[in-house]
């Protein structure tokens, strides 16, 4: 496949070889191997991928070079691997938290903890939230770090929605271990679990909704939310649109359904990788429903 890609002078042959070499290793792994393999091979591949995809592209030509149909399976496998390994990593840390006498110290050692501190700060300010507000987070995973950081750093309560039953149950146990169960709840479900009642019940209604980077497909999620969220409601979604990470995330070029307006977009500031896109529900669909 390497020979089918015309090289650009800006993009070195060595990086192309690195991409294809990593692809060859990753595509051989089954989902179960990525999640459960006991050897350190999977971890080494993840760390190698993490270094690779955080590199900057030097020009638009570099992006065009890699954003071709024949490259789609390469980045699809990388995206699958990264998402599954993230579940593996979060599951491991969740179990370590449950087994520890110092659970907060374990949490703070999580590989991407500092990333979440920065990312949540961006969203807290972007939504103009205040303590005691409540948010929805779609795609909370086995270690609901976004919700934990929102509560710990800003006093924001939350409801997480996680479609995998095992991950949802594990996250509930983690929240109980950390003493956060009163202010953070977890629902086993997906975007279809969100209804109009979640936004009008005076005791549980949320001020904002965040869609995780791994929550897909975002077009389908946003279409459903149009049916249930009130006019003026604010939400955000996280995407990767910097460097090689952009090629792992097709939602970076998402066409918004009519009925939303984008009112802010904040580019990642290290150590965070995600761009945060802030939306508001407009009145267009409300008038035509």
Image (cartoon, helix red, strand yellow):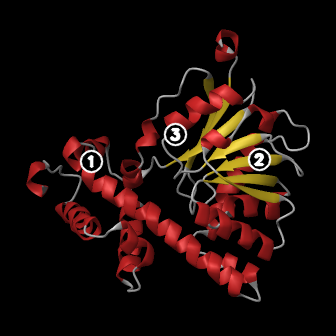
Q: Residue 74 occupies which quadrant of the picture?
A: bottom left
Q: Residue at x 45, y 69 (%)?
A: 85
Using residue 224 as the reference point, say whether residue 155 is left or right of it. Answer: right
In the image, which disc is placed on residue 135? 2
Q: Residue 272 occupies which quadrant of the picture?
A: bottom right
Q: Residue at x 24, y 67 (%)?
A: 18
Q: Which residue carries the number 3 mark? A: 218
Which tag, 3 or 1, sits closer to the chain's start?
1
Q: Could you say where residue 134 lies in the image, as x and y percent from the top left?
A: 82, 48
- Residue 111 appears in the rendering: no
Q: Nearer the viewer, residue 11 or 277?
A: 277
Q: Which residue carries the number 1 mark? A: 72
Q: Residue at x 62, y 25 (%)?
A: 261
Give neighbour class at mark 3: few <14, some 14-19, many 20+ (Cα, 10 Å). many
Q: Could you say where residue 214 lies in the image, as x and y percent from the top left?
A: 51, 53
Give neighbour class at mark 2: few <14, some 14-19, many 20+ (Cα, 10 Å). many
**Secondary structure found at label 3:** helix
Q: Could you say where residue 183 lies in the image, as x and y percent from the top left?
A: 85, 59
Give the vertical position of 261 relative to 80 (above or below). Answer: above
Using residue 202 as the reference point, say whether residue 103 is left or right of it. Answer: left
């Amino acid at each position: 496949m390497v020979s089918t890609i015309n090289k650009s002078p800006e993009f070195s042959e060595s990086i192309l070889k690195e991409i294809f070499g990593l692809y060859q290793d990753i595509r051989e792994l089954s989902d179960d191997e990525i999640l459960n393999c006991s050897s350190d091979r999977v971890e080494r591949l993840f760390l190698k991928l993490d270094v690779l995809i955080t590199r900057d592209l030097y020009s638009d030509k570099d992006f065009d070079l890699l954003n071709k149909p024949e490259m789609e399976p390469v980045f699809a496998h990388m995206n699958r691997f990264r998402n599954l390994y993230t579940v593996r990593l979060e599951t491991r840390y969740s179990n370590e938290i449950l087994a520890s006498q110092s659970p907060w110290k374990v949490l703070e050692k999580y590989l991407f903890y500092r990333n979440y501190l920065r990312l949540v700060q961006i969203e807290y300010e972007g939504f103009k939230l205040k303590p005691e507000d409540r948010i929805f987070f779609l795609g909370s995973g086995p270690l609901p770090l976004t919700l934990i950081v929102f509560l710990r750093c800003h006093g924001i309560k939350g409801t997480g929605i996680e479609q995998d039953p095992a991950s949802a149950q594990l996250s509930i146990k983690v929240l109980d271990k950390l003493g956060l169960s009163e202010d953070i709840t977890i629902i086993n479900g997906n975007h279809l679990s969100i209804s109009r009642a979640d936004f009008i019940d005076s005791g549980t209604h949320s001020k904002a909704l965040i869609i995780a980077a791994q929550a897909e497909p975002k077009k389908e999620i946003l279409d459903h939310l149009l049916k249930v969220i009130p006019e003026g409601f604010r939400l955000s979604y996280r995407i990767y649109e910097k460097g090689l990470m952009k090629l792992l995330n097709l939602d970076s070029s998402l066409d918004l359904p009519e009925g939303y307006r984008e009112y802010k977009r904040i580019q990642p500031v290290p150590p965070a990788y995600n761009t945060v896109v802030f939306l508001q529900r407009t009145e267009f669909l409300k008038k035509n429903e």
